[in-house]
Image (cartoon, helix red, strand yellow):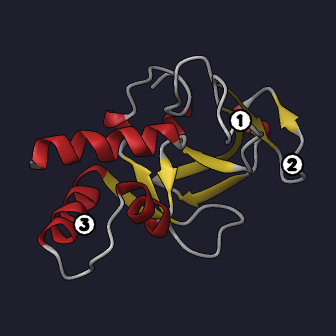
């Protein structure tokens, strides 16, 4: 069902701070057959809920969850209880967005961040630098 798939895709992107590479999204959805109907539907849903963006320190564009789907009034979309901070160009935490490393286009500024997932999981480790849109603070 398309509505269920849409919610699943949004949840996957939220669990990853609102961003994910295409291969990561495909793996998280368990897609295996490129020519399947499910694959085509998943690609259509990804295009609907996310936009490819170039982010600092990434060779390929990543899929960025559209801000209106973040489900957060401030900061990147993360699981409940997760924490995050902005990072400068050297990877050091900074308090203010103005001091963070920037990337993206003028109309879609991105800022480098780091986040820690909430709760016990194999991925509890600190996540590598990511990016959040200009709406990373209260929009």
Most extreme residue toward the bottom is: 35
Q: Residue at x 48, y 43 (%)?
A: 18
Circle number at residue 124 = 1
Q: Image height check: is 124 above or below 63?
A: above
Q: Earlier in the sequence, mark 1 or mark 3?
A: 3
Q: Residue at x 84, y 53 (%)?
A: 89
Circle number at residue 91 = 2
Q: Earlier in the sequence, mark 3 or mark 2?
A: 3
Place of residue 81 in the rendered image (x, y in percent of width and height, measured from the top left) = 60, 17
Place of residue 20 in the rendered image (x, y in percent of width and height, measured from the top left) = 50, 56
Circle number at residue 43 = 3
Looking at the figure, which quarter contains the C terminus?
top left
Residue 56 lies in what quarter of the image? bottom right
- Label 1 to label 3, Cα distance in Å? 29 Å
Q: Foreground: 50 or 15?
A: 15
Q: Foreground: 100 or 50?
A: 50
Place of residue 61 in the rendered image (x, y in percent of width and height, measured from the top left) = 51, 69
**Quick one: SS at disc 3?**
helix
């Amino acid at each position: 069902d398309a509505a269920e798939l849409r919610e699943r895709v949004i949840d996957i992107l939220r669990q990853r701070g609102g961003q994910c590479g295409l291969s990561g999204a495909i793996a998280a959805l368990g897609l295996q057959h490129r020519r399947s109907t499910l694959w085509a539907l998943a690609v259509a849903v990804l295009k609907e809920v996310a936009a490819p963006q170039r982010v600092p320190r990434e060779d390929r564009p990543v899929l960025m969850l559209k801000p209106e789907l973040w489900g957060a009034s401030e900061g990147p979309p993360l699981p409940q209880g997760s924490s995050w901070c902005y990072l400068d160009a050297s990877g050091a935490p900074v308090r203010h967005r103005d001091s963070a490393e920037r990337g993206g286009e003028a109309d879609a500024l991105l800022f480098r961040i780091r986040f820690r997932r909430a709760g016990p999981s194999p991925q509890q480790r600190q996540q590598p630098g990511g990016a959040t849109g200009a709406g990373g603070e209260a929009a």
